[in-house]
Amino acid sequence: MKKKVVLAYSGGLDTTVIIPWLKENHDCDITAVCVDVGQEADWKTIKQRALDTGASECVVVDVRKEYVEEYVWPALKANALYEDKYLLGTSTARPLIAKVLVKEARRVKAQAVVHGATGKGNDQVRFDLGVMALAPDLEIIAPWRTWRLKSREDEIRYLKRRNIPVPMKKKDSYSRDDNLWHISHEGLELEDPANEPLLAHMLKMTVPPEKAPNKGEYVEIEFEKGIPISVNGKKLDGVSLIKTLNVLGGAHGVGLADLVENRVVGMKSRGVYETPGGSILYYAHQELEHLCLDRETYAFKQLAGQKMAELIYGGLWFTPLREALAAFVNVTQETVSGTVRLKLYKGSIRSAGVTSPYSLYNASIASFTTGELYNHADAKGFIRLYGLPVLVRALMKQSSAKPAKPAKAGKAARASGAPARAAK
């Protein structure tokens, strides 16, 4: 009986090579699994390509709704941002893809899960840890870690020798990952950090900021407990809402990030990310939190969000710590409801007003005009106590800096044990 495997299949170069390679080296029965997380894909063509190259079955699993509600929204509510720039587009999708692969493996009674992540990348960690957490009994096959192919050029030659059509154009051979939340680009001129990205040639969802309209555009987003629910007054489900903001943001060149990042495996890599809708939502959500969260909660939540980003980036979604941080974040979001108005202009986002029924901004206290809730005289005592450590330290330094006074002769003699002279 042939071994059964499920393959995370995108129809791109790597997975197109993997199917015939598996047939030749593992003699297995392959179920190709396409996980729809919102990427732009011709699923009919991709399914046929899988079958033509040797898969016995190819299924498309639509998890866009689950992706947004169970993976994207938790990251957004945490303001999880990796190394100050990356909005975790690929990172949030990988644990869900691993979950789907395990489910399909159980359905077909497979013994192994196969993925096309390279031995240098982050995705191998994310896929492996996801499968390990959900199905530790399944074998994991990662061809890039074992085969003799060393480059994309090797893969292209491999396909041509077998008369298999190459699913890409050499001149546009960026390594890309796209889903509903973002598009990432790696390779070509980006492999040298000294090179400026060729945005006009590269971008798919966003216009270069200098080519954006000369007139800005306002957008209004309503949130309920940290989750966006409407754009410009129109209620939308999560998938439609992100699509709408991708179009708006992309038209104004919003959401581009060029990052040399630290990969999980220890090396640095460079990528350009397009996240127009996500960048708008992160900005709006943070503006609302500034209004609705107290100082201590906001400060601690910043630490939690950074840790959440590190866990998600490192493939540690299915862990107690990630779940515990998400639970903490959910508590903080109970009062993060309201409406944020933003202006988009040539790659920039800026606030144009924010309102909330849970606003902690009190004009009677904050206004320059004295109100009943604040007495200016109270500030003196507060500052005295608040600055007491500063005052004590300053007094110590002042005291230690004074030169010692010389002792009188009589006192000096008595201190030394010598008899003092009688006064004349």
Image (cartoon, rainbow, N blue to C red):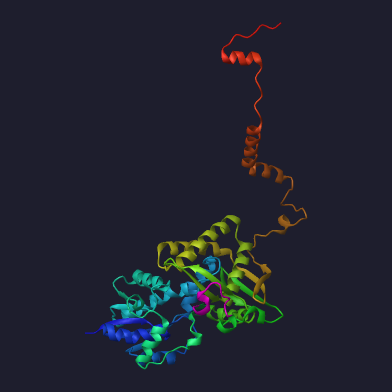
Q: Give residue 300's position: percent from left, percent from top.
A: 54, 57
Q: Is residue 353 left or right of residue 270?
A: right
Q: Is residue 317 above or below residue 182?
A: above
Residue 366: name its quadrant: bottom right
Q: Main secondary structure of the magenta part?
A: loop
Q: Give residue 31's position: percent from left, percent from top.
A: 33, 85
Residue 377: say if magenta: no
Residue 187: say if magenta: yes
Q: Residue at x 68, y 44 (%)?
A: 383
**In front: 26, or 5?**
26
Disc count in the image? 0
Q: Is residue 204 visible?
A: no
Q: Residue at x 60, y 66 (%)?
A: 286
**In front: 282, or 372?**
282
Question: What residue range appears in magenta?
Answer: 186-198
Q: Give residue 390's position: percent from left, percent from top.
A: 63, 42
Q: Is residue 315 above or below residue 419?
A: below
Q: Is residue 359 above or below residue 403?
A: below
Q: Is residue 321 left or right of residue 368?
A: left
**In front: 357, or 412?**
412
Residue 44: name its quadrant: bottom left
